[in-house]
Image (spheres, grey):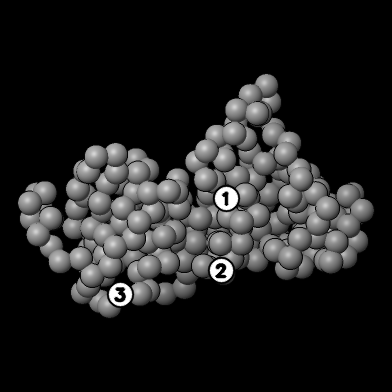
């Protein structure tokens, strides 16, 4: 039987939402789901090599950012890049950088992004993936 | 199965995931399940409340037999048969 498929339109470049995405990817990996991730606009900023590990922006409850980040440390929560990497090691995860999003953040080539990224693509591929997905999320 | 019955089961593999939060224990179980044979029993130690519900659902989806959960002081032992 073919694996079920999760398609994730990943828009957010903030560590709170990226961490949530990492948790969901963990659940997908545990169930051997195939996962297609499309890195859109602000997420492409977070995927740039020079930003991934130093970006500590949060999107929600911003006045509690320090508490939130401290709690992630206290709970031994892996950095979102580590959670994504673990999911890639455990199931079939492909990470596509939206070509437009890359250009917005001056990323023209795949090498401008962290090694987790597999290719640069257009929105047509997202539409095809989303049409055939069992679960389709926008974060 | 009651706690006495669960406690008497021979465990072939024990995974200690008490230092991790969701989805850490589930992923630890997923990683370790490949290391035991069909019919063998694995226990997952977790201090994460959500794992008590995650593992039975995961077992159901993957075709493993969820045997039960033993509540220890500050953590759970969740047993399953591959």
Is residue A43 depicted above or below B8 in this figure? above
Q: Which residue is mark 3?
A: B36
Q: Nearer the viewer, residue B58 or A133?
A: B58
Chain hosting mark 2: A
Residue A74 at what x, y percent from top left? 52, 38
Residue A56, quarter of picture = top right
Mark 1: few/some/many CA within 10 Å (<14, 14-19, 20+): some
Q: Secondary structure at mark 1?
A: loop
**Residue at screen point 7% across, 51% down:** B4
**Residue at screen point 56% across, 39% down:** A72
For marks 1 and 2, give the one nearer the viewer: 1
| Marks 1/2: CA–CA distance | 15 Å
Q: Is residue A27 left or right of residue A139?
A: left
**Residue sticking out furthest to the bottom:** B37
Q: Indicate which disc, 1 or 2, sits on the residue closer to the N terminus.
A: 1
Residue A134 at what x, y percent from top left? 51, 58
Q: Are marks 1 and 2 in contact (CB under 8 Å)?
A: no
Chain hosting mark 1: A
Chain hosting mark 3: B
Q: Are marks 2 and 3 in contact (CB under 8 Å)?
A: no
Mark 2: few/some/many CA within 10 Å (<14, 14-19, 20+): few
| Marks 1/3: CA–CA distance | 26 Å
Residue B63 at what x, y percent from top left? 29, 67
Q: Which residue is mark 1?
A: A78
**Residue at screen point 42% across, 48% down:** B19
**Residue at screen point 10% across, 53% down:** B1
Q: Nearer the viewer, residue B20 or A46?
A: B20
Q: Which residue is mark 2?
A: A89
| Marks 2/3: CA–CA distance | 19 Å
Q: Secondary structure at mark 3?
A: loop
């Amino acid at each position: 039987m073919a694996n079920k498929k999760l398609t994730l339109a990943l828009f957010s470049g903030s560590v709170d939402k990226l961490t949530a995405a990492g948790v969901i990817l963990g659940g997908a990996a545990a169930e051997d789901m195939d996962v297609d991730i499309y890195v859109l606009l602000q997420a492409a900023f977070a995927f740039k090599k020079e930003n991934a590990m130093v970006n500590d922006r949060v999107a929600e409850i911003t006045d509690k950012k320090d508490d939130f980040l401290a709690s992630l440390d206290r709970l031994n929560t892996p950095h979102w890049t580590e959670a994504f990497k673990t999911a890639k090691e455990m199931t079939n995860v492909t990470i596509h950088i939206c070509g437009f999003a890359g250009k917005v953040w001056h990323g023209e080539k795949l090498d401008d992004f962290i090694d987790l990224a597999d290719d640069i693509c257009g929105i047509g591929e997202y539409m095809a993936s989303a049409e055939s997905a069992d679960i389709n999320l926008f974060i | 199965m009651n706690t006495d019955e669960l406690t008497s089961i021979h465990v072939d593999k024990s995974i200690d995931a008490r230092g991790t939060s969701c989805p850490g224990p589930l992923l630890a179980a997923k990683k370790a399940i490949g290391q035991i044979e069909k019919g063998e029993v694995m226990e997952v130690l977790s201090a994460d409340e959500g794992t008590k519900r995650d593992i039975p659902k995961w077992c159901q989806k993957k075709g493993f037999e969820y045997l039960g959960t033993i509540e220890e002081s500050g953590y759970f032992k969740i047993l399953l048969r591959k």
